Amino acid sequence: MKITLLTIGKTEDKYLLEGIDIYLKRLKHYIPFRILEIPELKGIKSLSQEQQKTREAELIVKNINSTDYVILLDENGQELSSKQFSVFLNKKMVGGQQHLVFVVGGPYGFSNEIYKRSNEKISLSKMTFSHQMIRLFFTEQLYRAYTILKSEPYHHD
């Protein structure tokens, strides 16, 4: 199985890039993982929120294959503990999923088209975080999940 984190926009803050890089290096020992950044939309000041979400949806769909299992990182998604997330990932591996694609939307969330295309929704927290920070938090949680699955001493109860 391989995992992709699909995001709108790029991470620019050096401290976040350094943190993400740490977990990307650690994850290489467990699973093929990549972060795929879709460029932010240009000239959006004249677009409504729905129009922005529709244009972002077009870009997201271009980067998802029909066989991909799509999980939206969405504030209304299911909340999982780190252990529950590791169980979730393990079920997907055992179930034969070839490619999980976790998607972080733009500033206004997802269009209805993306909600319809998704297989599941997960929330990382009831709190709101910047989309740049979500990349670091998700990458760390992915690493944590694999250390839990391997019974390694990173996660403490």
Image: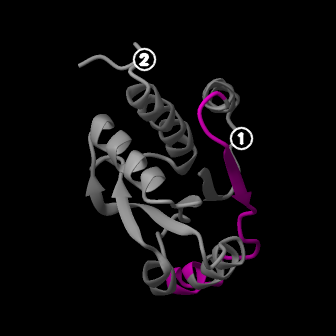
Task: Specify the farthest residue to the top.
Answer: 153
Magenta span covers which residues?
29-53
Residue 152's label in the rendered image is 2
Q: Are marks 1 and 2 in contact (CB under 8 Å)?
A: no
Residue 71 is covered by the magenta coloring: no
Task: Specify the farthest residue to the left.
Answer: 157
Specify whether 28 is left or right of 150.
right
Q: Which one is in front, 156 or 59?
A: 156
Q: Is residue 69 above or below residue 145?
A: below
Q: Amino acid at mark 1?
A: Glu
Q: How is the image coloured?
A: one colour
Residue drawn at 60 percent across, 79 percent down:
57
Q: Position of residue 44 (x, y in %)?
A: 68, 76
Q: Give the quadrant of residue 26.
A: top right
Q: Position of residue 24 (x, y in %)?
A: 66, 32
Q: Which label sits in the foreground, 1 or 2?
A: 2
Q: Amino acid at mark 2?
A: Glu
Q: Is residue 157 above or below residue 16?
A: above
Q: Position of residue 33 (x, y in %)?
A: 65, 44
Q: Give the quadrant of residue 62.
A: bottom right
Upstream in sequence: badge 1 or badge 2: 1
Q: Quadrant of the C terminus?
A: top left
Which residue lies under the disc numbered 1?
Answer: 12
| Element class at badge 2 | loop
Residue 80's label in the rendered image is none
Q: Which one is in front, 21 or 142?
A: 142
Q: Residues within 10 Å of mark 1 (few under 14, many from 20)?
A: few
